[in-house]
Amino acid sequence: MPIALIVLAAGQGSRMQSDLPKVLHRVAHAPLLAHALRAGGTLRPDRVVVVAGHGGDAVEAVTRALDPEAIVVRQTEQKGTAHAVAQARAALDGFSGDAVILYGDTPFIRPETLDAMLSARADGADVVVLGFEAADPGRYGRLVTDGDRLERIVEAKDATPEELRIRLCNSGVIVADKDLLFELIDQVGADNAAGEYYLTDIVALARAARRPARVVTCPEAETMGVNTRADLARAEATFQADMRREAMATGATLTAPETVFFAHDTVIGRDVTIEPNVVFGPDVTIESGATIRAFSHLEGCHVSDGCVVGPYARLRPGAELDRGVRIGNFVEVKSAQVHEGAKINHLTYIGDAEIGARANIGAGTITCNYDGVSKHRTIVGADAFIGSDTMLVAPVTIGAGAITGSGSVVTEDVPDDALALGRARQVTKPGYADRLRQALRTLKESC
């Protein structure tokens, strides 16, 4: 059965106290909307429709970046969830199949749960609703059932005292035939406490038309919605806890799991060791057998097997480490290819560069890659030895096996196996230190 995905992302999210649309707030370095689209994307939908409203231009721009084929429609007036879904009607002209409704602020719906809902549809239910047993039902809509049949959904503000005692609650996620969905939405009214068009009313309308409705359940944590900054923090904590468990279950060692923070797309191989207080930004892959030592920050980089990174290292976008590379304390690498077995162990910046195999980069080395207008590239050949406190003024090439003297400023290419010295000759004047101190004290006293 073809599938269309409708993601509701029009809410203002006033409780976030933010100018940023709610669905663009981030969990694990990705917008909430990205998590929802990724969950729905596991169904391989034929069409994706995102309903934007508040901050629509920003939501549309992010949607285009996440899925260029997605269709973005606008809900210019906030009249409720049924009204929001209705805005997707024109975008689904010509489509025949099931519509899956997700929410841009509900990031943790699992693929297995969506598969279970589609299975319920295949088993004969015309409308399938995702429910959960709430620890504190509070403001959630209640699912009124008769055996395994779903009779209706009652919003908390419209519920009777008896209905408020129900703990089976509505997540808002719905699967239904697309044509039936819009047929039912056309019948939804706004005769309720909020004066809105509730999508939940389609269940009772379906039952009245003898169209069976069913509930599929999932854990409450999976349906977590984000409405406040506190919710956002809880969502981040939930994601991180799940990611840590997954990393350890697949063979990584986290010596202090609660201090390691992953991004939504972090890839960790087997037998990787991650020490305390490591932070991963987006687009990081760590291959098997690597060690990431404490207090390191990595983003946009690739670390091959057998590498050791840190402690206190920073790998920025474009850092590519071949196998067996050593990146030590207070080293920063950006837009650089570091070949097999190279060592950059202390207090060094390597940017816009290529470091040859087995090269040794001494402490305090800097690739001076930026002239205030443009970036320039530094190349260090295999087996080169860069002395401590060398300034490599790009563009410059250091040949294979070459050596630079400590404290050198290198502005010209160095041939293979050559020694480059680029520093002033030392001058020593005996007794001048004491004479200088006396002169400085005299100057100070006269001021």
Image (tube, grey):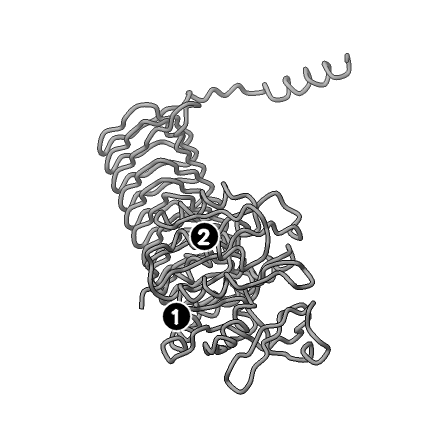
| Number of other residues with Cα within 10 Å of mark 1, as a class: few under 14, some 14 to 19, many 20 or more | some
In the rendered structure, the answer to whether residue 22 lies left or right of residue 323 reads right
Across and down, in percent, residue 2 comes to: 32, 65
Residue 292 occupies quadrant = bottom left
The furthest residue to the top: 446
Please identify the quarter of the rendering in which residue 83 is found.
bottom right
Residue closest to the far left = 416
Relative to 102, is 129 above or below?
A: below
Query: What residue does disc 1 label?
Result: 251
Say which amino acid is labelled 2. Answer: Val
Q: What element carries label 1?
A: loop
Q: Where is residue 154 in the image (x, y as percent from the top left)?
A: 62, 72
Quarter of the image where one finds residue 370:
top left
* Of the two numbered discs 1 and 2 in the rendering, the one whose residue sits closer to the viewer: 2
Residue 70, given in percent of the width and then of the height, sits at 38, 50
> Farthest bottom residue?
147
Q: Earlier in the sequence, mark 1 or mark 2?
A: 2
Give, as a three-letter code, the residue at label 1: Gly
Residue closest to the eye, 209 or 121 = 209
In percent of width and height, residue 63 lies at 43, 48
Q: Callout 2 environment at 10 Å: few (<14), some (14 to 19), or many (20+)?
A: many
The structure residue drawn at horizontal position 55% and vertical position 45%, both measured from the top left corner, is 76
Q: As rendered, which of 137 and 164 lies closer to the eye?
A: 164
